[in-house]
Image (cartoon, helix red, strand yellow):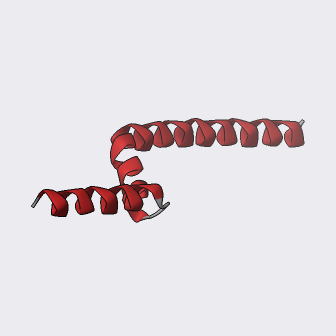
């Protein structure tokens, strides 16, 4: 069984060394909701900035 476990360890190290869905999912799991929250935050800021910009353009046109 020790030989089997050693082979398993080798297989696991090979998988982790390869850039694959395992590492990607791990990264996603590590980031979690934090990244999603930050993304929504920046999106909100972007929307606000866009609306402000539109207002400025309109005021410039009306002037």
Give how far across and how far down residue 3 sits, in percent. Answer: 18, 61
Picture quadrant of residue 15:
bottom left
- The residue at the far front in this view is 3
Number of numbered discs overlaid on the protein picture:
0
Is 51 left, or right, of 59 in this rendering?
A: left
Give how far across and how far down residue 63 sits, in percent. Answer: 90, 35
Is 44 left, or right, of 58 in this rendering?
A: left
Q: Is residue 27 above or below residue 44?
A: below
Residue shown at 44%/40% (left/top)? 35
Is 29 left, or right, of 61 in this rendering?
A: left
Q: Is residue 18 above or below residue 52?
A: below
> Which is nearer the eye, 63 or 38?
38
Give how far across and how far down residue 55 sits, in percent. Answer: 73, 38
> Which is nearer the eye, 22 or 52?
22
Quarter occupied by the N terminus: bottom left
> Which is nearer the eye, 20 or 50?
20
Residue shown at 49%/36% (left/top)? 41
Give how far across and how far down residue 56 sits, in percent. Answer: 78, 35
Residue shown at 82%/41% (left/top)? 57
Residue shown at 41%/48% (left/top)? 27
Q: Is residue 6 above or below residue 45?
A: below
């Amino acid at each position: 069984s020790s030989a089997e476990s050693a082979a398993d360890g080798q297989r696991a190290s090979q998988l982790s060394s390869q850039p694959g869905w395992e590492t990607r999912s791990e990264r996603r799991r590590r980031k979690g909701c934090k990244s999603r929250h930050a993304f929504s935050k920046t999106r909100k800021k972007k929307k606000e900035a866009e609306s402000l910009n539109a207002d400025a353009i309109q005021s410039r046109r009306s002037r």
